[in-house]
Amino acid sequence: MRILSVSDQTEPILYDPGSYKSITGIDLILSCGDLPSEYLTYLVTVFNVPLLYVSGNHDGEYDFTPPQGCVDLHGRISVYNGFRILGLEGCHWYNGGRFQYTEKQMARLVWKMKFKIWWHKGVDIIIAHAPPRHVHDAQDTCHRGFECFYTLIERYSPDYLVHGHIHTSFKNSEARITRINETDVLNTFGYHIFDYQK
């Protein structure tokens, strides 16, 4: 399965008229937040594949104009081509805005996912806006990752945790990924394409 993951920044190679045609074979799109709803609507239309998303801390417009033809995955698990994908929106609380969570609030959300994960017999991919704490994150409150994401990684060993929120330039694809136990934590800032098979 070839996955296109996106977050935080619209990309001309995806958004300029006709330029997306240079990218072929996409089976699924995952959005990790902070993108205009019309951008996601455009991507799901031109690639004509499912698009699963979680909201970032700047996605308040989604309450009024959600991305059309896309699936909000927050607090849910979706199964696509046999792959179990879980979503968690938002970032660390910093000013009380929409899609912000304290560590305790996010830990409660993670705890509530236990039954759903058990029901699906595990999880293969987690998409989140924020990263785990001390992996790709920063020291300021807004860009601090969540400690409780380690619970998901350690208990369920997903193959990927894909996140956005941290704006970083990468020299190559490998620089986007940090391995924790059996899980590749991938910063998808801008866009990234990866092939996934079990």
Image: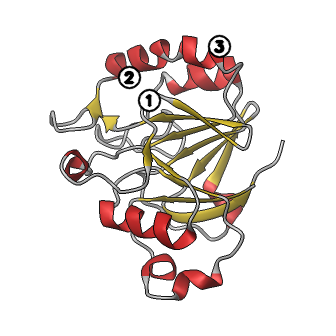
User: Measured along the vertical axis of the image, is residue 57 above or below residue 172?
Assistant: above
In the rendered image, residue 85, in percent from the top left (x then y), is placed at 60, 36
Residue at the (48%, 33%) spot, across then down: 133
Task: Give the side of residue 4 with respect to residue 31, left or right.
Answer: right
Q: Is residue 9 visible?
A: no
From the image, state whether disc 1 or disc 3 is nearer to you. 3
The CA distance from mark 1 to mark 3 is 22 Å
Q: Earlier in the sequence, mark 1 or mark 3?
A: 3
Identity of the amino acid at label 2?
Met
User: Measured along the vertical axis of the image, is residue 40 above or below residue 33?
Assistant: below
Q: Which mark is residue 118?
A: 3
In the rendered image, residue 80, in percent from the top left (x then y), is placed at 66, 42
The CA distance from mark 2 to mark 1 is 8 Å
Q: Which mark is residue 106?
A: 2
The CA distance from mark 3 to mark 2 is 19 Å
The residue pinned by badge 1 equals 146
Residue at the (44%, 88%) spot, across then down: 17
Q: Residue furthest right?
A: 198
Q: Which mark is residue 52?
A: none
Element carrying mark 2: helix
Q: Quadrant of the N terminus?
A: bottom right
Residue at the (29%, 24%) spot, across then down: 102
User: Measured along the vertical axis of the image, is residue 109 above or below residue 91?
Assistant: above
User: Measured along the vertical axis of the image, is residue 18 above or below residue 144?
Assistant: below
Q: Earlier in the sequence, mark 3 or mark 2?
A: 2
Task: Give the side of residue 169 with respect to residue 157, left or right.
Answer: left
